[in-house]
Amino acid sequence: MAKKKDDDRKIVADNRKARFSYFIESSLEAGIMLTGSEVKSLRNGKATIGESYAHARDGEIFLVNAYIPEYTQANRFGHEPRRVRKLLVHKREVAKLSIAMQREGMTLIPLKLYFTPKGIAKLELGIAKGKKTHDKRETEKARDWQRDKARLMRDKG
């Protein structure tokens, strides 16, 4: 059986609500600039990216409002938990993302924060458009039907 793509990643934080609240049009992988105490804290696995977003400014992309708790053993060399962090993306991708964000209703949403097998912290960003309330109901209805259909198929055969 083929190995899944996510098997070799150690996922630190996952924004599960993003797929419910947004239509994800495309996604890309970006590096993230971290201090030493932030990396240590991420390895403990307590980070949250549920309320965060990314924005482009001066040809660079920044991650805003991501929570990486302070590392308790990093005495005076600690970090601020909700500081703005720079994302490492090629200039062509920054230009493409800036154009996509200028379109109506488009935003950059962090989907996953993980470590690669080499131990490098990466962030999966999604170019997304917000869902309306009726779209969210439609998604929930489809998910419930899939669950019921699977239950029926399992019981019948």
Image (cartoon, rainbow, N blue to C red):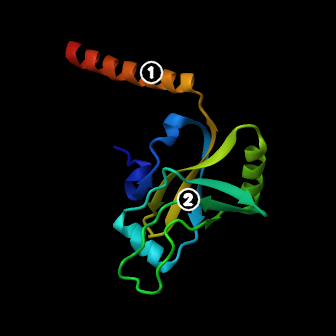
> As shown in the figure, which amino acid type bears the numbered disc 1?
Ala
Classify mark 1: helix, strand or loop. Answer: helix
Q: Quadrant of the N terminus?
A: top left
Could you tell me which residue is drawn at 46 percent across and 80 percent down? 78
The mark tally for this picture is 2
Q: Quadrant of the C terminus?
A: top left
Of 89 and 5, nearer the camera is: 89
Q: Is residue 105 above or below residue 40?
A: above
Q: In the image, which disc is placed on residue 94? A: none
Single out the residue that lies furthest toward the bottom.
Answer: 76
Q: Residue at x 35, y 68 (%)?
A: 44
Is disc 2 in contact with disc 1, using a CB cutoff of under 8 Å?
no
Quadrant in which residue 118 is drawn = bottom left
**Image: 36 above or below 119:** below
Q: CA distance from mark 2 to mark 1?
A: 32 Å
Q: Is residue 58 above or below residue 146?
A: below
- Element on which disc 2 rests: loop
Q: Identify the residue shown where x is 59% and y is 28%.
A: 132
Image coordinates for residue 62, horizontal then vertical, percent: 65, 62
Q: Describe residue 141's horizontal placement relative to residue 26 as left or right.
A: left
Residue assigned mark 1: 142
Q: Residues within 10 Å of mark 1 (few under 14, many from 20)?
A: few
Q: Position of residue 59 (x, y in %)?
A: 77, 62
List the residue tagged with mark 2: 65
Residue 153 on image: x %, y %: 28, 16
Q: Nearer the viewer, mark 2 or mark 1?
A: 2
- In percent of width and height, residue 2 lies at 38, 45
Q: Quadrant of residue 16?
A: top left
> Which amino acid is tagged 2?
Asn
